[in-house]
């Protein structure tokens, strides 16, 4: 069983790091992308296995790799100006090293450094990188450890017998669903599909576009639409095309 990043870091006196070009570090640190293998031409030392590994975003940005990730996964990859560089962005457990891997991220001919339990830092910690495995300076380790422990700290649910109570800065009451309190919203039916969702404020409550549809046909035949920026439309909760974020406001105002 692999210990969690928090358990391994809580009393650690040092932390090894690995510098990745962008957007590869972004792919590791972004849960929706979920890069769980780092490809290297060499095996990690046995002492590094089962230990936490800091993911450091280097200064180099690989535009060709960014285009490849976007094409393969159908996701928007941040450009050079939007990517964090020169900072620690995540911590993962280096679970094992494999000559072959079933991960979609493994490149044949490389050693798969298998990552598990990745924790993304809410505030990337600036730090100079290096080649190979290297150790974080003590002051950087302290900042990284604090953020990891804060991110994984357990939050005890509030138990209330079906009552709405409290308030929040978002302008709504706290909603109690069973044993869990959701602050700042209300459980309402989606105005499109009528399934319950968490809504805020007096405006219309909808799921909105939440699924990126690629390689699908639009209702009634024809290709799935794209906007003027070349972005694929999302699929609404009713299976209908819905404008991506870059054009949603414009289409809403036109309607």
Image (spheres, grey):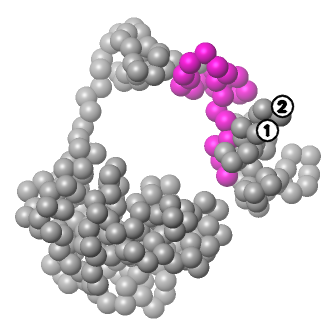
Left or right side of 66 for 153: left
In the rendered view, tell whether residue 163 sits above or below residue 185: above
Relative image position of residue 68 (x, y in whole percent): 61, 75
| Towards the viewer: 99 or 66 | 66
Task: Specify few, some or many for label 2: CA neighbours under 10 Å numbering under 14, 14-19, or 20 or more.
Answer: few
Q: Is residue 191 magenta?
A: yes
Tell me where the magenta segment starts and ends, as one range.
189-212
Quarter residue 170 falls in? top left
Tell me, for residue 251, which label it has, or none.
Answer: 1
Mark 1, secondary structure of its residue: helix
Relative image position of residue 70 (x, y in whole percent): 62, 67
Relative image position of residue 157 (x, y in whole percent): 30, 25
Relative image position of residue 150 (x, y in whole percent): 23, 44
In the rendered view, tell whether residue 184 sits above or below residue 111: above
Q: Do the residues under discs 2 and 1 have CB atoms within 8 angstroms? A: yes
Mark 2, secondary structure of its residue: loop
| Towards the viewer: 173 or 106 | 173
Left or right side of 210 for 174: left
Left or right side of 144 for 187: right
Q: Is residue 75 magenta?
A: no
| Quadrant housing the C terminus | top right
Q: Residue at x 36, y 24 (%)?
A: 180
Q: Residue at x 66, y 45 (%)?
A: 245
| Towards the viewer: 106 or 33 | 33
Q: Which residue is mark 2?
A: 255
């Amino acid at each position: 069983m692999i210990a969690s990043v928090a358990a391994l870091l809580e009393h650690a006196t040092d932390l090894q790091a690995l510098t990745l070009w962008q957007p590869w570090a972004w792919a590791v640190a972004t849960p929706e992308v979920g890069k769980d293998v780092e490809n290297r031409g060499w095996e990690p030392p046995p002492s590094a296995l089962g230990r936490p590994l800091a993911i450091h975003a280097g200064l180099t940005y690989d535009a060709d790799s960014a285009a490849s990730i976007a094409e393969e996964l159908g996701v928007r990859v941040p450009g050079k100006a939007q990517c964090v560089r020169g900072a620690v962005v995540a911590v993962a457990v280096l679970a094992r090293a494999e000559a072959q891997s079933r991960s979609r991220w493994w490149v044949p001919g490389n050693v798969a450094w298998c990552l598990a339990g990745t924790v993304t830092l809410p505030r990337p910690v600036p730090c100079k990188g290096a080649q190979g495995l290297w150790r974080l300076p003590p002051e950087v380790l302290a900042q990284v450890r604090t953020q990891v422990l804060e991110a994984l700290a357990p939050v005890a649910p509030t138990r209330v017998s079906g009552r709405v109570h409290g308030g929040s800065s978002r302008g709504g009451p706290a909603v109690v669903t069973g044993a869990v309190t959701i602050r700042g919203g209300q459980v309402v039916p989606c105005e499109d599909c009528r399934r319950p969702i968490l809504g805020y404020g007096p405006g219309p409550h909808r799921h909105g576009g939440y699924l990126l549809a690629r390689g699908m046909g639009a209702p009634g035949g024809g290709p799935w639409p794209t906007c003027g920026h070349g972005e694929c439309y999302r699929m609404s909760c009713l299976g209908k095309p819905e404008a991506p974020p870059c054009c949603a406001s414009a289409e809403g105002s036109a309607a």
